Structures are given as C-alpha cells and as structure tokens.
C-alpha cells in the first residue's frame, strides 16, 4: 500500500528563511518590531542574545520544513532554551526606556504563541505567492471564518465576503488578523461565482480606529477587529519589488522597466512554486526571443543557448538560491552578446549587470580568479557563505575595472551577511589577502 506524506510548503519556507535578524533595539518589546518589519526580519520579544534568537529560529525552520507539530517543537526547543538560560522570569533592563522590568522569557505558553504566529504567518505569505501566480484563473478571494468556540466575533464582519485578488482590502485584512486567528481565504474562479450566484461584495468600511503605539507614541489607523500589527499582508510585503526594481534599472525607459518587472516577478513566482530556475531572453524591442526552465533533476542548470539569443538582449534569470550573479551568469552575458543580465532570487534580492560595449570579459576573469582563489582559499573555504561572497566580490571587481555596471538590491538577511563580511569583501576586490 502506498504511503503518502504531505509535501513541504515551499513558498512558506522561502518566505521564512529570507528574513534577517532584527536589530538589538528591536528585540525587547513586541511593538519594537512593527508591521511590515516582520516580513523582513525575524524577532522574538526578550530574546536579546543572538544564540537564543538563532536557536528559536532554527527550530521554527525545522518545523516548517519537516511538518513538525507544536508538541514536537516544544519538546525539542524547551531544553535548548533552558540550557541557554532563557527560561522563566527575569529582571531585565528595557534598552529603550532604561527601566528595569520583570520579563517573561521562555515558557511552554510562549513557545505556543511563537509557533502558532510564525507558522500561520509563513503559510499565509506562501499562500499569497501562490495566489499571485494563479490569479488569472482564480481572480477572486473568499474570506472564511472557521466556526469554532474560540472564534473572534470581530472577524465575523469579514466572513463570506468576496473581493478580487487585487482589491486593496487584502493589504489590510488578509488573515491571520490576530494571535491564534483561524480565518483563511479561498480562491474562487469565474465559474464558481456563476454556479453559486455570487458577486463581488460591496467595498468594506474598515471602520478604522486610532491606536497609539506605546513605544514610539505614533498614532496608527487600524481596521476594527484586527489586532494592531496584524493589519498588513506579509506576503505582499515580501513579494513587492517595485522600489527595488526602479533602483536597479536606472538605464531603462519607463515602458521597458514596466515590461521587464512583470517577467521578473513571474520568474520568481515560478521558482517559488516549482523549485527550478528559469530564463527569459528579451530582444532589443522587448519581445520574448527565448525562454526555458531547468529540469527538476538539475534545478540550478537552466540552459543558455547562445544561438537563440539575439545580440543586445536582456537576460532575465531566476536563481535557485539568494546567491549573486554567478561567474557562469556573467560569462554567458558576454558569450551571448546580450546587453544585460538580471537575476531575481526567492527572497527578493535582485542582481543586475550591464556590460560595457567592446570590453573583454575573460582577461578580467583570469586576473581575478587566479589570484583570489589561491590567496583567499582559507578565508573562503572556512566561511559558509564563501561562494556567494566570492561571486559578489567578482562582480564588484568587474565594475571597478569598467567591464560591467553592477546594480543590486539585497534582502535584509543578505544585507546583514554582506555587512558581517565587509572586510573580506574589500580585500577580495583589492586583491589584498592581509587583514
């Protein structure tokens, strides 16, 4: 008899693992890290030490990837946190106010809140990515409040309402809309709407209420019934690359920029869903000259058929990981005669190179690789992110030598990674192995 096991929610995992770590001053109170910031950075209130925060995140990642239950999460994490001394109550100094307060650290109840909130939010963000990928066939979202004794009566006014996927209401009330919120949305087709005699619901009066942020004193408008801080859509924040795209495409016309971002977003969504890289080549007029995806057996090996790519093309590429442009990417940029290559990563980082005309790639590559691989072997080999650092340094080196113009926008996790290794990057670019 065949045994079927649930598949990991790929999009939810990609969302969760793309996060950086919140700054120390944002770790004490749950309101120090606010709204959209949760989509970019990981934080647990009162987990001030890096080792404590990392331990909780590791177990949360494991739970997402392996489908572990709350009981398993608590059983494995509680002794780790107890061993780290992060358990029970403790007098702590508030780094913002300087006050001494009795703080609740680890407890079984806190682990339940951490597990439930992050699990629901990650799955909601992953579901939003799936919604964006399939919205042409499923253009409506149907808000459903699960019937249970603990349901929130304030969420009943959202129940059974239907709006289009692109209605801005979903940026304010997309569930979860509070701690332990069990609401969800279902995708609906045009056919389903006709068969069930349903129409789009009238615009929703959010009945926003003024709420004071106790840590900053700022005033916010929050939809009635939604817990402050939950009145945002984490998946929409995660997927939004509009400002980033503008910053890395200053050389494109507005029309070309608009056309390419649509393709780049599509490549990212396909990568999140299928786990394989994709490549699209646009000719100089913006038409699709060639496109393909890597096979599941070799998900990071999308082909670059040189004869099918016209000179002057724009190469748009989805990466399997959040890594920068690879040496192969840059080599193909020159070998195909393309004008630029852009990669979009699962987490939303964008790496883009525009080549200088009439400049050779190979001499610069040989100069960089022959010296850096030998001189920096120990530094790179001992660093878990050594390959990514080498590739990023190479692109910066090429820009310094006026071989390419290099644009990039990183996720918060990658920004922190590059900042931690700034000295190594500088030495790689300059060719100075000494610290």
Image (tube, rainbow, N blue to C red):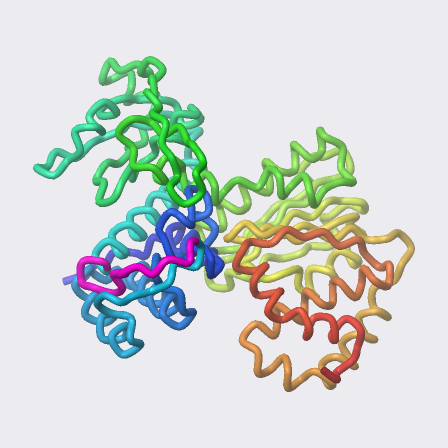
Q: Which residues are magenta?
A: 97-110
Residue drawn at x 23%, y 62% as measured from the top left: 68
Residue drawn at x 34%, y 39% as measured from the top left: 230
Q: Is residue 73 visible?
A: no
Q: Residue furthest right?
A: 358
Q: Is residue 407 left or right of residue 171?
A: right
Residue 111 found in image quarter: bottom left
Q: Position of residue 320 (x, y in %)?
A: 53, 58
Residue drawn at x 70%, y 71% as measured from the top left: 425
In this view, the residue in front, 266 or 248, is: 248
In this view, the residue in front, 263 or 94, is: 94
The answer to whether residue 305 is above or below residue 375 is above
Check if residue 55 falls in the magenta segment: no
Q: Position of residue 189 (x, y in %)?
A: 33, 25
Q: Is residue 290 left or right of residue 69?
A: right
In this view, the residue in front, 159 or 353, is: 159
Check if residue 104 falls in the magenta segment: yes
Q: Residue furthest left?
A: 149
Q: Position of residue 35 (x, y in %)?
A: 42, 42
Residue drawn at x 46%, y 50% as measured from the top left: 272
Q: Is residue 214 visible?
A: yes
Quadrant where the N terminus lies? bottom left
Q: Is residue 163 left or right of residue 153?
A: right
Q: Is residue 281 left or right of residue 354?
A: left
Q: Position of residue 150 (x, y in %)?
A: 12, 39
Residue 162 found in image quarter: top left
């Amino acid at each position: 008899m065949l045994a079927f096991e649930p598949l990991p929610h790929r999009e939810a995992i990609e969302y969760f693992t793309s996060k950086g770590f919140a700054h120390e001053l944002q770790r004490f109170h749950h309101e120090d890290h606010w709204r959209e910031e949760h989509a970019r950075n990981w934080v647990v209130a009162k987990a001030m030490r890096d080792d404590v925060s990392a331990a909780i995140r590791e177990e949360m990642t494991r739970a997402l990837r392996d489908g572990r239950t709350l009981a398993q999460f608590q059983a494995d994490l509680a002794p780790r946190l107890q061993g780290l001394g992060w358990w029970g109550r403790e007098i702590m100094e508030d780094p913002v106010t300087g006050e001494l307060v009795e703080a609740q650290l680890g407890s079984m109840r806190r682990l339940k809140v951490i597990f439930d909130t992050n699990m629901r939010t990650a799955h909601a963000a992953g579901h939003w990515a799936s919604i964006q990928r399939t919205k042409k066939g499923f253009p409506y979202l149907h808000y459903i409040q699960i019937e249970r004794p603990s349901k929130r009566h304030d969420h009943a006014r959202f129940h059974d309402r239907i709006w289009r996927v692109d209605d801005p209401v979903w940026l304010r009330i997309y569930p979860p809309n509070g701690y332990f919120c069990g609401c969800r949305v279902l995708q609906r087709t045009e056919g389903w709407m006709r068969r069930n005699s349903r129409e789009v619901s009238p615009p929703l009066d959010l009945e926003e209420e003024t709420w004071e942020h106790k840590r900053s004193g700022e005033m916010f408008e929050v939809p009635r019934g939604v817990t402050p801080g939950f009145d945002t859509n984490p998946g929409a924040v995660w997927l939004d690359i509009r400002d980033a795209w503008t910053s890395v495409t200053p050389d494109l016309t507005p029309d070309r920029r608009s056309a390419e971002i649509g393709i780049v977003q599509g490549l990212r969504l396909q990568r999140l869903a299928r786990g394989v890289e994709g490549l699209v080549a646009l000719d100089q007029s913006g038409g699709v000259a060639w496109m393909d995806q890597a096979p599941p057996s070799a998900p990071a090996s999308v082909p670059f058929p040189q004869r099918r790519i016209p000179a002057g093309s724009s190469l748009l590429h989805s990466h399997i990981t959040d890594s920068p442009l690879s040496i192969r990417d840059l080599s193909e940029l020159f070998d195909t005669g393309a004008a630029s290559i852009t990669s979009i990563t699962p987490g939303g980082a964008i790496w883009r190179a525009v080549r200088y005309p009439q400049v050779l790639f190979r001499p610069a590559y040989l100069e960089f690789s022959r010296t850096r691989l030998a001189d920096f072997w120990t530094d790179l080999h001992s660093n878990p992110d050594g390959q990514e650092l080498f590739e990023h340094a190479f692109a910066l080196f090429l820009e310094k030598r006026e071989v390419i113009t290099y644009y990039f926008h990183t996720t918060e996790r990658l920004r922190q990674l590059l900042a931690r290794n700034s000295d190594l990057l500088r030495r790689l670019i300059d060719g100075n192995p000494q610290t």
